[in-house]
Every structure is written in structure tokens, then in C-alpha cells.
């Protein structure tokens, strides 16, 4: 996955495996019938070993790429609470999560193909260079000689750090999240942050794929360059 020119096919990713034990949030079977890349929760905000294995097996059967959806250690808060984690510790935790998913990916005959932060970590790495660098260090540690691509927001500190470390970056856009006029995501705590109308999500998806743009929450056109 790399940035694509106007009119080129675009990857479709979604968060999967976001359950724990008997509790399930995502409809993994249904999502795997439409997505081309699956961001699999690795146990820190959601997900458990059996869920990770099941999703990897299903993804392998359906030819869907598997990526590690890494998070702060925040199972109770679903990875959406702000946390301050020392850089070295965060790098180790990122590598740990990727490694856990890689075990189940290999058992299904596939490999972890990319990494995407989740929730509060994703948002923090848009602006925080230190935390972004720690995430990249964890990706490098887990990937070894394989340069795992990093999926994230265009222009983020995360992509800057990944590029500086020689890792491929994949820019993504969100069809179900509101944007500010500056091109960042509207925080979930604010009204209208999540687009829930299905027709509106479809319309935004087509606009992202065809026009490389979205309409911000205040009605402005925002250019987005996204491969996923």
C-alpha cells in the first residue's frame, strides 16, 4: 500500500477483532467480506489470543491483508484515554503487540503486513514527535529486516518518524469521522465527530476515492491524499 494517483484503486481497511472473551464489538465475518485490509486488535485495547487467531484464519481464507492495530495498555478504556507512557516502554509494548499477532498470522500461513495505532495513541502520534518515534521504534523492533508500513494520518508526526526511519508510510482517510478545516479528525468528545448516517458514509467514501477530498465539519473542502 502506497499513496495512489487520482482514479487509482484504493485500499479499504477496518478495525477487526475488537472483542474480548464472550464480548464482541465488531462483526468480523461481515467486514472480512468487504475490506482488503484488517486492522486486528492485539490485546491492549481489545482482542484476546483466540480472537486474534480466529480473525487471522478468516483473513487468510478470504485473501485479506492483516495489520497490527496497536494501542496504549487500556483495556478498560478501549484505548481511548489519554496516557503518558515512557518512550522505551511504549516501544516495547508496540513490539509486543505486533509479535503476538504475528504468531497467529503465521499459523494461518500469512504475515503481519502493516501497523496502525488505535484511539488515543493514533491521535497522540499526529502531533507528539516523541510518542510517534517510540511507536516507530517498536515497529522496527518487531519487524526486524522487514520494513513494515505504518498506516496513519497524512502529515502526522508518526509518518514523519516512519519516513525518517526508512519505513513505508500509508496515508489514510476516514469516511465515518468528521474532519476539521485543518485536516485533522474532530475529537470524539465533540458533537458530530462520528458520521453515523450510512448514505453519508458512502458519499464521503466516493469523494475520498474519486476527488481526494472531504467536507469538513464546518462545510469547507479539505484535500486528502489517501491510499487506504
Image (spheres, rainbow, N blue to C red):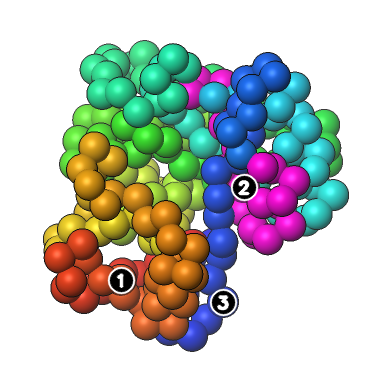
The residue under label 1 is 214
Residue 53, compared with residue 12, is above or below; it is above
The residue under label 3 is 9
Q: Earlier in the sequence, mark 1 or mark 3?
A: 3
The 10 Å Cα crowd at callout 2, few under 14, some 14 to 19, many 20 or more, is: many
The 10 Å Cα crowd at callout 1, few under 14, some 14 to 19, many 20 or more, is: many
Q: Is residue 116 left or right of residue 126?
A: right
The 10 Å Cα crowd at callout 3, few under 14, some 14 to 19, many 20 or more, is: few
Name the residue at 53% across, 71% down: 10
Disc 3 from disc 2: Cα separation: 17 Å
Q: Is residue 15 left or right of residue 64?
A: left
Disc 2 from disc 1: Cα separation: 23 Å
Residue 84, compared with residue 130, is above or below; it is above
Disc 1 from disc 3: Cα separation: 17 Å
The residue under label 2 is 38
The part of the chain drawn in magenta is: 27-45
Amino acid at each position: 500500500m502506497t499513496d495512489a494517483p487520482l482514479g487509482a484503486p484504493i485500499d479499504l481497511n477496518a478495525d477487526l477483532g475488537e472483542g474480548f472473551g464472550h464480548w464482541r464489538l465488531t462483526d468480523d465475518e461481515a467486514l472480512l467480506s468487504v475490506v482488503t485490509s484488517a486492522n486486528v486488535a492485539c490485546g491492549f485495547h481489545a482482542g484476546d489470543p483466540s480472537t486474534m487467531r480466529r480473525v487471522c484464519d478468516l483473513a487468510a481464507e478470504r485473501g485479506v491483508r492483516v495489520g497490527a492495530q496497536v494501542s496504549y495498555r487500556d483495556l478498560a478504556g478501549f484505548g481511548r484515554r489519554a496516557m503518558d507512557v515512557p518512550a522505551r516502554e511504549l516501544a516495547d509494548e508496540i513490539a509486543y503487540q505486533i509479535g503476538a499477532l504475528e504468531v497467529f498470522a503465521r499459523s494461518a500461513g500469512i504475515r503481519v503486513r502493516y501497523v496502525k495505532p488505535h484511539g488515543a495513541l493514533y491521535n497522540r502520534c499526529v502531533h507528539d514527535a516523541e510518542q510517534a518515534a517510540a511507536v516507530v521504534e517498536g515497529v522496527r523492533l518487531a519487524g526486524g529486516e522487514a520494513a513494515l508500513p505504518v498506516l496513519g494520518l497524512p502529515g502526522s508526526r508518526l509518518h514523519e518518524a516512519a519516513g525518517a526511519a526508512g519505513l513505508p508510510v500509508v496515508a489514510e482517510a476516514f469516511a465515518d469521522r468528521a474532519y476539521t478545516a485543518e485536516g485533522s479528525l474532530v475529537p470524539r468528545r465533540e458533537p458530530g465527530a462520528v458520521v453515523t448516517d450510512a448514505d453519508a458514509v458512502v458519499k464521503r467514501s466516493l469523494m475520498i476515492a474519486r476527488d481526494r477530498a472531504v467536507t469538513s465539519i464546518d462545510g469547507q473542502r479539505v484535500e486528502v491524499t489517501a491510499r487506504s
